């Protein structure tokens, strides 16, 4: 679920806070995606991601997405904390992987029913709601509770959405995609008196 409308995002956040048994602000997260120079992982819908958040670094390996008719997808995702980010980056480099995208987001997480609901705001493309749960029925129950059943799910991931926006605006895409809040500020016209 996505919205570039700030009022809609605030409304969804209020509903999340009302329904949540636990809420947490993760602050700014930086995600870096790695692939071969030929993007062999992306072509097979695999992803290697380093996430930096709250002073910690995590590595994630994501398998291909499998879509259900409802728009919900599942995939195998393994994530763990990397105690030495320099050694991790050296290992990725030794495997011939290069950084193809970097993006930032502000994330709020809510525990609602059996699911974790993430409300993300990204530079250039706005706010998104991600619902992760044990099965499609649990996800649909949370969508219903949040009054979002009639909203069409977004099936693209953030880098895919950013690439669509960047192609339209002439900004570089992978392997040089940079979607940080500083990069967004740099593209805004400066006010003059």
Image (cartoon, grey):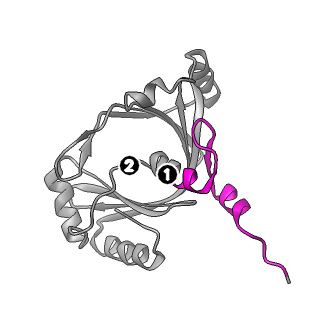
> How many residues crowd around disc 1 within 10 Å: few (fewer than 14), some, or many (20 or more)?
some
Residue at left offset 46%, top offset 23%? 40
Position of residue 5 relative to residue 60, above or below, is below
Q: Nearer the viewer, residue 36 or 138?
A: 36
Quarter of the image containing the N terminus?
bottom left
* Labels 2 & 1 near each other (Cβ < 8 A): yes
Q: Is residue 63 magenta?
A: no
Residue drawn at the location 55% of the way across and 16% of the way down: 95
Residue drawn at 44 percent across, 31 percent down = 42
**Whole-percent x and y of residue 80?**
44, 34
Q: Which residue is mark 1?
A: 164
Name the residue that disc number 2 marks: 156
Q: Quadrant of residue 192?
A: bottom right
Percent x, y of residue 12: 35, 73
Using the rendered image of the protein, determine whether residue 104 is visible from the camera's viewpoint.
no
Q: Please tell me whether mark 2 sits on a helix, a strand or a loop.
A: loop
Q: Is residue 171 magenta?
A: yes
Identify the residue shown where x is 55% and y is 55%: 168
Could you tell which of marks 2 and 1 lies nearer the N-terminus?
A: 2
């Amino acid at each position: 679920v996505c919205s570039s409308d700030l009022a809609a995002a605030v409304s969804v956040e209020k509903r999340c806070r009302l329904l949540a048994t636990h809420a947490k602000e993760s602050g700014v997260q930086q995600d870096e995606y790695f692939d071969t120079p030929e993007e062999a992982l992306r072509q097979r819908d695999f992803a290697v991601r380093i996430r930096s958040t709250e002073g910690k670094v995590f590595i994630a390996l994501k398998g291909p997405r499998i879509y259900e008719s409802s728009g919900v997808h599942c995939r195998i995702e393994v994530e763990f904390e990397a105690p030495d980010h320099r050694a991790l980056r050296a290992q990725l480099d030794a495997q011939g992987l290069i950084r193809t995208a970097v993006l930032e987001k502000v994330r709020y997480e809510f525990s609602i029913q059996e699911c974790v609901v993430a409300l993300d705001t990204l530079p250039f493309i706005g706010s998104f709601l991600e619902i992760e749960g044990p099965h499609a029925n649990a996800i649909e129950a949370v969508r219903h509770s949040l009054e979002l059943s009639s909203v069409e799910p977004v099936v693209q991931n953030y880098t895919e959405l950013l690439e669509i926006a960047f192609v339209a605006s002439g900004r570089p895409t992978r392997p040089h995609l940079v979607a940080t809040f500083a990069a967004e500020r740099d593209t805004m016209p400066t006010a003059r008196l």
